[in-house]
Image (cartoon, helix red, strand yellow):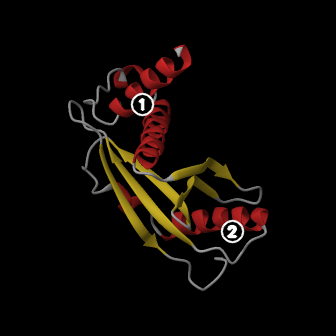
Amino acid sequence: MKRNWMLQAYFRWFDRSLDRAVRLGGRDQMERGEWNTLIGNLGEKLARKYLWKTGKKVLYHNFRAEGGGEVDVVFRDGEILVFGEVKTRTSQQFGRPARAVNRPKQRLIIRGANAWLRELNIPDVTFRFDVLEILLIEGEVPNIRHIKAAFQTPQKGLGR
């Protein structure tokens, strides 16, 4: 009985973080790199919560391939394996966060996806590349936009 109560309390807390206004204090007391890391980590955590809440199954996060390549979050959307890139911003001063997923960044994600697929030894699985945009604007609830099939590999099967 006690365990059930604890789980319910945890899930109530887990759900609310997506609905609470953002409070981003202390930026002036941090180095730029520290601030960017903090915001990026917070965005990735919120993205995983969003995916969980919308019925997706997160399989792994922060995958780094030995020979280069990275994937922020690997998850299942039904029968489709998804390699997700999370982009978090605190303003739209330089446009939407997804604009930062340019061709060099896409190649890095594709290399990470290739490494993941090789490790699975199942290259015939259906997969896609999504982008999760997270906008953290002071005093507002996090704005999360899930862009499905945001980009594709240049050929069928494994990407380059």
The percent position of residue 154, horizontal first and vertical second, equals 56, 83
Q: Distance between the residues labelled 2 and 1?
A: 32 Å
SS under mark 1? helix
The disc placed on residue 114 is 2
In the image, what residue type sits under mark 2? Answer: Asn
Q: Nearer the viewer, mark 2 or mark 1?
A: 1
* Viewer-closest of 115 and 19: 19
Q: Residues within 10 Å of mark 1 (few under 14, many from 20)?
A: few
Percent coordinates x, y for residue 43 in the rendering: 42, 41
The mark nearer the N terminus, 2 or 1, is: 1
Taking the spot 48% from the left edge, 44% from the top edge, the residue there is 48
Residue 30 seen in render: no
Residue pictured at 20% horizontal, 30% vertical: 139
How many numbered discs sit on the rendered protein? Answer: 2
What residue sits 21% from the left and 35% below the top?
Answer: 140
Q: Residue extending furthest top?
A: 2
